[in-house]
Image (tube, rainbow, N blue to C red):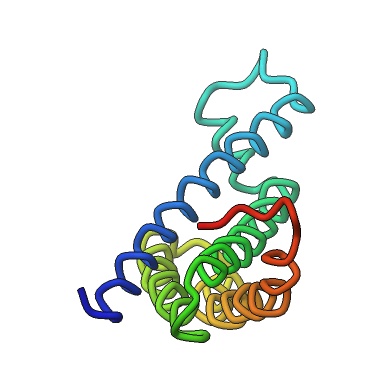
Amino acid sequence: MTTNTSLIKASGLTFLLYVALSVVCSIVLTGIWQRGVDTSTLTTEQLMLMAETAPFIKTGSAIIGIVSAVVCAFILSLKRTVGGYRPAIYFAAMLVLYGAISIALHPEHTLIQQAAKVLMPFPLCLLGAWLAHRFAPALSASPNAVNG
């Protein structure tokens, strides 16, 4: 198997991890938000509309996306010992495609949200890769480090 094929497969699996992590965190975020809302008098449609406009949900979703992208790029770059920043760049490209699909599916979002969906994956993934390269020697030197 070539290095590029291996990197694409690893990036694809990392993308699936990103989606799973984002979904789980979003479910938790929505559950926390709902605890503060009186849902007894609201219909499902009203509750969905309220969630779409809630600043808590919007801010929390942005934070979840940022942290998930950095963490997943960190994990991908930590596991990949060759390729430098290339695994993170492949992963970021997948996130840009995901962001473009999200723009098409959610045209009601503000311009800043739409721009962030396609502009932020590269800096965030490169940050995660940089953190992995920065802390990889410290993590591998740790007596409790897991070899993988």
Residue at x 75% of width, y 26% of height: 37
Q: Residue 91 in the image: x percent, y percent?
A: 44, 72
User: Is 86 placed above or below 62 here?
Assistant: below
User: Is 102 placed above or below 130 here?
Assistant: above
Number of labelled discs?
Answer: 0
Q: Residue 131 in the image: x percent, y percent?
A: 69, 75
Quarter where residue 129 is shown = bottom right
User: Is 89 placed above or below 59 here?
Assistant: below
| Apparent side of residue 14 relative to residue 2 in the rendered image (left or right) | right
| Apparent side of residue 100 relative to residue 108 in the rendered image (left or right) | left
Residue placed furthest toward the right: 36
The residue lying toward the viewer, choosing from 104 and 15, is 15
Residue at x 65% of width, y 48% of height: 53
Residue at x 30% of width, y 65% of height: 9
Residue placed furthest toward the left: 1
Q: Residue 39 in the image: x percent, y percent?
A: 67, 19
The residue lying toward the viewer, choosing from 95 and 144, is 144
Q: Residue 102 in the image: x percent, y percent?
A: 41, 63
Residue placed furthest toward the front: 143
Residue at x 20% of width, y 73% of height: 1
Quarter where residue 62 is shown = bottom right
User: Is 94 placed above or below 29 here?
Assistant: below
